[in-house]
Amino acid sequence: MSECVSLFYVLLPEYKQELNPYMLLLSRYRNASVHSALPSFQTYEVQRMAFLALRLLGILQSQKILSEFAHILTKDDEKFLSAFRLERIDRVKKKIEDAKEKSKHIPTGKVSVGVDGWESYITHCPIYESDGVLSGYTDIHVEGSDEDPDIWLDFLADGFTCEECGLQLDDIEELRLAGIELVYDRSGELDEWGRDHFEPEPDEYM
């Protein structure tokens, strides 16, 4: 499963930021099922999996990997997709309202948090005067010739959590609705990235 998802991102990297939260949820429940544990699904999580299935179908058909006749969207499919998107807007509005209400009862003062690794990034919470944690991944980009390459490093966000006000956003559409940026420049950390990803471990010389 993990290899299949990784291969999908290699072949179609432009969809990774959008689909990563859904794939992680699918992997989590898949792993539980493999070990004979029946996962306890919430309705919203089932809806997210249904959205992922239809979204993947559309992507694979648009790439001519699947025939357009492999599955033709039914009226029920289209109704579900429309309702899912509208409900997401309402859900984010409620999340923001709940976070604003909770923030009224938090002692004033900026709260800072720290993270390690390349799958998290700190940004300012849009609700409360504190830092929140973006989930996602860091990726290197190279353009130009081998002799004169243009190299930069970006963090691509696909989720957000603020421990203070409780705001939690689950995908890039929810981030957009909350007014949070999706891409952050980490080019100042290129040397550290190179050490973590390209330098061999000491025992490789043994």
Image (spheres, grey):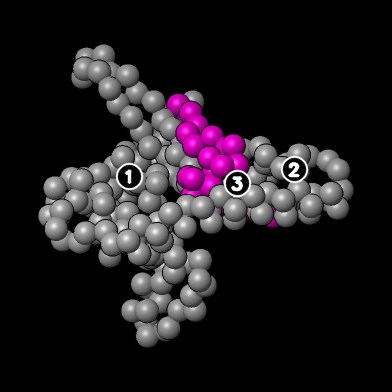
Residue at image position (32%, 54%) is 55
Question: Which of the image's four quarters has the N terminus?
Answer: bottom left
Type of the residue with mark 1: Tyr
* Circles 2, 3 touching at the beta carbon (< 8 Å): no
* Circles 3, 1 touching at the beta carbon (< 8 Å): no
How far apart are labels 1 and 2 at the CA level? 31 Å
What residue did someone put label 1 on?
15
What residue did someone put label 2 on?
128
Determine whether, in the image, residue 60 is placed left or right of residue 131: left
Closer to us: 136 or 58: 58
Please name which of the two marks, 2 or 3, marks the residue nearer to the observer. 2
Q: Which mark is residue 133?
A: 3
Q: Secondary structure at mark 1?
A: helix
Q: Residue furthest front?
A: 75
Q: Quadrant of residue 66?
A: bottom left
Determine whether, in the image, residue 31 is placed left or right of residue 146: right
How far apart are labels 3 and 1 at the CA level? 22 Å
How far apart are labels 2 and 3 at the CA level? 13 Å
Specify few, some or many for label 3: CA neighbours under 10 Å numbering under 14, 14-19, or 20 or more.
many
Residue at image position (34%, 23%) is 151
Please name which of the two marks, 3 or 1, marks the residue nearer to the observer. 1
| Magenta stretch bounds | 166-187
Report if residue 75 is visible in the image. yes
Work out whether mark 3 precedes mark 1 in sequence or the reverse, and give the earlier one: 1
